[in-house]
Image (spheres, helix red, strand yellow):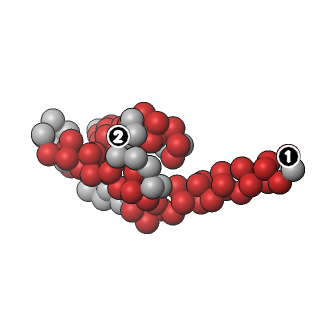
Amino acid sequence: MLRWKAALICEIEIVLCFIALLVYAYCSSLNGCELWDLWNKNIDKVCVAWRKALRRVWNLPFNTHCNILFELSNALPVYDVMQTSVIFYYQVCA
C-alpha cells in the first residue's frame, strides 16, 4: 500500500513539473520588457494577471499566497524576471 501511495505522489509531482514547464515555455513570453518602465503602475497589473493565471492552471484556490505560487512553480516571480532582463539589457548596451 505504501509503494502505491509513493508512486502516486511521485506521478503527481512529475505532472506538476511538466505543467510548470509548459506554462513557462508557452505563456511567459515577455519580449520587449527590457524597454518597459518598471516604475509604471501598470506593471503590477501584469504581475497580478500572471499570478491569477498560475492559480487557474493549477486549480488552486484564489486566495493562495503569491510566495507559495512561485515555490510551486520553481521559478522567479514575473517582476523579478523583468528586472533581470532590464539589468542584463543595460549591461549589454553599456
Q: Quadrant of residue 92?
A: top left
User: Against 87, is 49 above or below?
Assistant: below
Give the number of callouts: 2
- Horizontal placement of 13 versus 65: left or right? right
Badge number at residue 19: none
Q: Is residue 49 visible?
A: yes
Q: Residue at x 26, y 46 (%)?
A: 48
Q: Residue at x 28, y 45 (%)?
A: 47
* Disc 1 residue crowd, few under 14, some 14–19, many 20+, Cα 10 Å: few
Q: Which residue is mark 2?
A: 63
Residue 94 versus residue 85: which sits nearer the camera? 85
Quadrant where the C terminus is found in the figure: top left
Residue found at the far bottom of this picture: 26
- Horizontal placement of 10 versus 83: left or right? right
**Which amino acid is tagged 1?**
Leu
Q: Of callouts 2 and 1, which one flags the residue occurring earlier in the amino acid sequence? A: 1
**Which amino acid is tagged 2?**
Asn
Counting from the top left corner in percent of width and height, residue 12 is at 66, 55
CA distance for labels 2 and 1: 32 Å
Counting from the top left corner in percent of width and height, residue 40 is at 12, 40
- Horizontal placement of 40 versus 88: left or right? left
Task: Find out whether the residues at labels 2 and 1 contact each other: C-beta distance under 8 Å.
Answer: no
Q: Is residue 54 visible?
A: no
Badge number at residue 2: 1
Q: Secondary structure at mark 1?
A: helix
